[in-house]
Image (cartoon, helix red, strand yellow):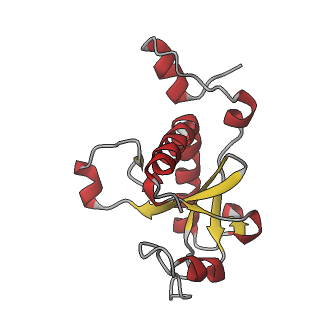
């Protein structure tokens, strides 16, 4: 059984935290989009949601999906900006090299029927396709850590009563 990079490091540091749900943890994370109609619906309740209105780029609200307590949660990817170089990673903020960041604190519940799996190989723009492939590789190198952080943030929000 091979462990993800995060769990390998934690094991080297003699931490007991390892992937407890091994079969689930070894599955690769995939990049998804969320249907515009669902984002529009949720934006009534959450001001921080980005609204894609079919802009000129045609790029959607994309991110990764976790299953926590039998519900699907979507954590958005944001483009890497110069300010991110200075920022430290935390439980709720993960850098995907210098390609993107995942703001786990912005994760939202999404019914499976509102998710659209991104077909990276079908992307016509070669530069955007390369970026998505690079992000996908790096996300899956960090998948165990990303999932664990999502659970930590979920449990924190659940305890403090601000879970969507």
Q: Is residue 159 above or below residue 13?
A: below
Spot occupied by residue 12 in the image (x, y as percentages of width and height): 46, 13
Picture quarter with the C terminus:
bottom right
Quick one: 76 or 100, which is closer to the camera?
76
Residue 22 visible (yes or no): yes
In x, y percent, where is residue 157? 47, 51
Q: Is residue 103 visible?
A: no
- Seen at 51% across and 87% down, the residue is 55
Answer with left or right where residue 147 lies relative to residue 123: left
- Hey, which quadrant is residue 129 in on the image? bottom right
* Residue situated in front as seen by the camera: 22 or 127: 22
The residue lying at 67 percent from left, 21 percent from top is 2
Relative to 32, say whether 147 is above or below. above
What's the residue at 63%, 68% (across, down)? 33
- Considering depth in this image, is 24 or 43 the residue closer to the camera? 43
Q: Is residue 30 above or below residue 78?
A: above
> Residue 82 at what x, y percent from top left?
26, 59
The structure residue drawn at horizontal position 55% and vertical position 71%, both measured from the top left corner, is: 61
Does residue 119 appear to the left or right of 99 in the view shown?
A: right
Residue 44 placed where, x, y %?
51, 82
Quadrant of the rendering where the N terminus is positioned: top right
């Amino acid at each position: 059984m091979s462990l993800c990079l995060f769990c390998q490091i934690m094991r080297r540091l003699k931490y007991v935290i390892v992937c407890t749900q091994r079969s689930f943890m070894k599955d690769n994370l995939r990049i998804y989009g969320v249907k515009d109609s669902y984002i529009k619906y949720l934006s009534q309740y959450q001001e921080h949601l980005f609204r894609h209105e079919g802009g000129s780029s045609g790029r959607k609200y994309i991110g990764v999906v976790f299953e926590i307590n039998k519900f699907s949660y979507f954590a958005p990817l944001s483009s890497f900006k110069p300010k991110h170089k200075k920022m430290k990673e935390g439980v709720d903020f993960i850098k995907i090299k210098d390609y993107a960041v995942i703001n786990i604190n912005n994760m939202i519940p999404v019914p499976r029927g509102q998710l659209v799996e991104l077909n990276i190989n079908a992307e016509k723009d070669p530069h955007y396709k390369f970026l998505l492939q690079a992000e996908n590789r790096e996300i899956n190198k960090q998948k165990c850590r990303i999932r664990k952080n999502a659970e930590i943030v979920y449990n924190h929000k659940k305890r403090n009563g601000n879970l969507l």
